[in-house]
Amino acid sequence: MSRKRKPKYIRIFVLTLFIVFLANGAYKTVSNFLPFILSRPFRGISSPLRGPQSQDSSPAGIKEPISLNSIKEELYSPYAILIRLKDNKVAFRTRSEERIYPASLTKIMTAIIAMENISDLKESVILPENIFPSLYAANASMAGFLPGEKVTVIDLLYGTLLPSGADASMGLALRVSGSEDEFVKLMNKKAKQLGMNDTHFTNVCGLYDDNHYTTVKDISVLLEYALKNKTFREVFTSARHSTAGTNMHPDGITYYSTMFEKMDTYEFDGGRILGGKTGYTRESGLCLASLAEKNGNEYILITAGAPGDHLTKQYHIMDAFMVYGKYLKK
C-alpha cells in the first residue's frame, strides 16, 4: 500500500511547490509595479477665474517621440508654459492663457520696477513700523527684517526674490512711490507696456485678492523681460545671500532661495536649473517661475496650480525637473 501511495504524495508535493512559486512571482510583479501606479500624478488646483481658453502649441525643442498629451499627463501643474529664450520659441504650453492667482510670482514685477526706479542700490531704506501688522495678520512670507530696520536697496531686492519677503517688497514700494497703491500703478503700467494683457495687480506681495490675477503666458513675458536686467538675473540665480549689518541685525541676515533650499541638486539630464521664484497661496496652489540651461540653450518654465503647500512634496519643483530633464532635446 505504501509504495502505491508514495507517487501520489510526491505529485502533490511538487504541485504545491509549483503553486507557491507562481504565487511568489505574481507578488513580486505586483510589488514592482505598485510604486509606479501610486506615483502617477493627480490634477492640480483649477483656477476659478474666467479667461480665454488657450490652445496647446506645437512642440519645439521637445525630445521625440514624446507627445504633448504625455507631458500634460505627467504634470502636477495644470497651467504651464516652456520657452526657449534665444528665439522666444514656445516649446510647450497648456492652459497658458487662462487666468491664475500668481501668489509671490508677483514679486518678479515688484523687483524689476524697483531696479528700474532706484539708481543707487546701496542706498538705505528704513522699514516703517506700520507696514508690519497687516503682513503678520496675512501670514505673509517674510525676509526677517524688523520694524524700524535700516536696510540697503540691494538687500531688499535679495530679500524680495530669495526668501520671498513681503517686508522687503513693501520697503521697495515705499521707497519708489511712497505708498503701495502708487507702486501698484507702476506695476500695472509696466504690465500693459509689456503686453501682459490678462494681468492685473492689486498689491506688491502677491497676497490673495480676487482682482489680482495673471496667466502663465504673461508671467513668461515678464520673466523674459526681467532677465535682461543684469542685477535681476544676478539676484534671481542666487541660492543664498547675506545682508550687510543693520541697526537691528549687526551681523546681517542670511537668507536662502525658497526654490533652491527645496532641491537636493540643481542638475538634471544634460543641464541644470539656474534660478527661480516660487509662489504659494491656498487659492493659487504651488507656482514656480524658473530658468534652466541645457546644451547651451536657456529655457524658462512657468507653472501654476500644483497641489500641496510648503509642508508637502514640492510638486511645482518636481514638474520643473520632469520637463527640463525628460522633454528637452539632448
Image: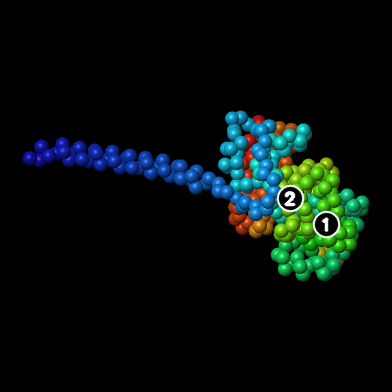
Q: Secondary structure at mark 2?
A: loop
Asked whether the viewer can see residue 213, the reply is yes
Sequence-wise first label, 1 or 2: 1
In the rendered view, would you say 281 is above or below 1? Answer: below
Q: Position of residue 250 (x, y in %)?
A: 83, 64
Residue in view at x 72 percent, y 41 percent = 300
Residue in view at x 73 percent, y 50 percent = 214
Q: Secondary structure at mark 1?
A: helix
Residue where numbered disc 1 is placed: 184
Q: How many marks?
A: 2
In the rendered view, would you say 198 is above or below 127? Answer: above
Mark 2 crowdedness (10 Å alpha carbons): few <14, some 14-19, many ≥20: many
Q: Position of residue 143 (x, y in %)?
A: 76, 60
Asked whether the viewer can see residue 223, the reply is no
Is 189 on the left-hand or right-hand side of 285? right
Q: Are marks 1 and 2 in contact (CB under 8 Å)?
A: no
Residue in view at x 62 percent, y 41 percent = 322
**Quadrant housing residue 138:** bottom right
Residue where numbered disc 2 is placed: 214
Amino acid type assigned to the residue bearing label 2 in the image: Thr
Is 179 on the left-hand or right-hand side of 297? right
Q: CA distance from mark 1 to mark 2?
A: 14 Å
Is 170 on the left-hand or right-hand side of 47? right
Quadrant of image for the C terminus: top right
Q: Position of residue 184 (x, y in %)?
A: 83, 57
Mark 1 crowdedness (10 Å alpha carbons): few <14, some 14-19, many ≥20: many
Amino acid type assigned to the residue bearing label 1 in the image: Val
Q: Position of residue 281 (x, y in %)?
A: 67, 58
